[in-house]
Image (cartoon, rainbow, N blue to C red):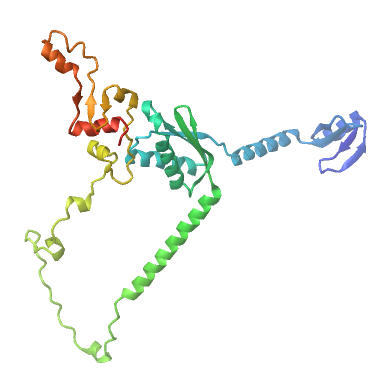
Amino acid sequence: MRVIDLDGEQLGIRPLPEALNLARDRDLDLVEVADKAKPPVVRIMDYRKFKYEEQQRAKESRKKSTNIVVKEMKYRPKIGIGDFDTKTRKVTEFLEEGHKVKITIMFRGREMQHPELGMKILNRIADQLKNLARVENPPRQDGRNMTMVLGPDKKAQAAYAAELKKAEHDAAAQARAEAEVAAPIAPPEAAPEAEARPRSRPNRTRPPSRSRPQPPSPEDRRPPPTISQEHPPSKCRPSTDERRTGQAPEGAIVMPKMKTHRGAKARFKVTGSGKIMRRHQGKNHLLQKKSSGRKRRLANEAEVTGGDRDRALRLLGKR
């Protein structure tokens, strides 16, 4: 068999007993490295050291490899501003750790009739995280869910970090320039004769007593700020009146009325003159034990007026 020395030098073709004696003389092992070759190739080495170095190389390779996990964050079409910010901040942490994030919009009931609300939320998330991630799978409808997959974008993160660093550097340089401009001018140096003058005794005044009240400063005389200045009112979800009128605060996601027309048409009827008449559904229980005149009045259709008229028009899809 062909024998290779510890340094990689070839010792030629030797019989097996002679190769074993060479390895024993050097207190090393004889390891077969190529059994398919003719003749087979063996090498003189320290097998334990070789296995240890191989394990260390495998360990280092496992450290350098990253295990990418797909995280998931679920939103709802009627999510409030506070919940939206909290969930998006958690998605940012996942992306900074190097994970992919699957965004899921869950629809329930009649919310399936308004997929544009889920698309609006997904576009808002993608626009807010454009400096950290890229859209790997665009939004698509999957049953009652709408999904989108975001992946970390190393180039965008590096560019954003460089932009932040540059902005901080410019702000520090501007602050130093403003400090130099606003620095007071040093007074002229005193004449040499002034140093020879005798120093007067310093005026040692008694410090004011702590119990004596101090006059208020001009800043203290200012009126305290109002509540709106310190803590402006914030809404995470519009109120019922704001949902009805459509005047919701900025950033709030308003879910429109999703009553089906089928149920509304069973209760209301729009005449040719524009009147809305209410049909008495299930009137049999109303007509029991009533006088004939009362039965005739209940059997007729009644006109819907006032605020009920506006609600009926919205249910019928006329507004």
Residue 132 placed where, x, y %?
Answer: 49, 47
Q: Quadrant of the N terminus?
A: top right
Outermost residue, left direction? 212
Quarter of the picture holding the C terminus: top left
Res 18 → quadrant: top right
Question: Can you say whether 2 is above or below 214 in the image?
Answer: above
Left or right of 200: which side holds 31? right
Q: Residue furthest bottom?
A: 193
In the image, residue 98 above or below residue 158: above
Left or right for 307, reference 100:
left
How many circles with numbers are drawn on the protein?
A: 0
Q: Residue furthest top?
A: 289
**7 and 162: which one is in front?**
162
Image: 289 above or below 204: above
Q: Residue at x 17, y 55 (%)?
A: 225
Name the spot of residue 220 as percent of width and height, x first: 13, 61
Q: Is residue 215 left or right of residue 73?
A: left
Residue in the picture at 67% in, 35% down: 55
